[in-house]
Image: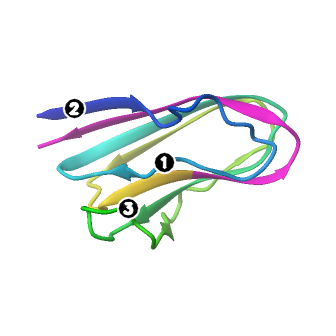
Amino acid sequence: MRVANDTIIPDGSPTLGGDWTSESLPLEHIAMFSIQLEFDGTPSGAFILECSNDDDNKEPTNWTLIEGSTQSISEAGDHTWNVEDSAFNWVRVRWIYSAGTGTLNSARFNAKGV
């Protein structure tokens, strides 16, 4: 079984005082994955997961909201998605800002596949 565990914010902790999008994560050979977020401050908005089935050999341009993935946030805390039987080529996290400020301190991707 293949296992992956990595950060999706390699350039440091982004502010949640505006919209933000993570790097694109390729899901080749991945059967299931989870993404864990930890954030501080008083951010108000929503974290969502988006997927793409664009060619897995180049950066995707077409993205779709993964239904049921929207997580509304109004204070510091954490959130984890656990996705089983994923068949997407790509996934990414988006923060849609409403108000307040905060920092995304940790965003970890863990995957298992064949």
Mark-to-mark CA distance, 2 and 3: 22 Å
Q: Residues within 10 Å of mark 1 (few under 14, many from 20)?
A: some
From this view, report whether residue 76 is shown above or below residue 44: above
- Quickly name the residue at label 2: 3
Q: Position of residue 2 (x, y in %)?
A: 15, 35
Whether label 3 touches label 1, CB < 8 Å: no
From this view, report whether residue 25 is shown above or below residue 41: below
Is 112 in the magenta?
A: yes
Badge 3 element: loop
Label 2 vs label 1, nearer the camera:
1
- Quickly name the residue at label 1: 23
Range of residues picked out in magenta? 94-114
Amino acid on which disc 2 is placed: Val
| Residue at screen point 45% across, 73% down | 62
Which mark is on residue 70?
A: none
Badge 1 element: loop
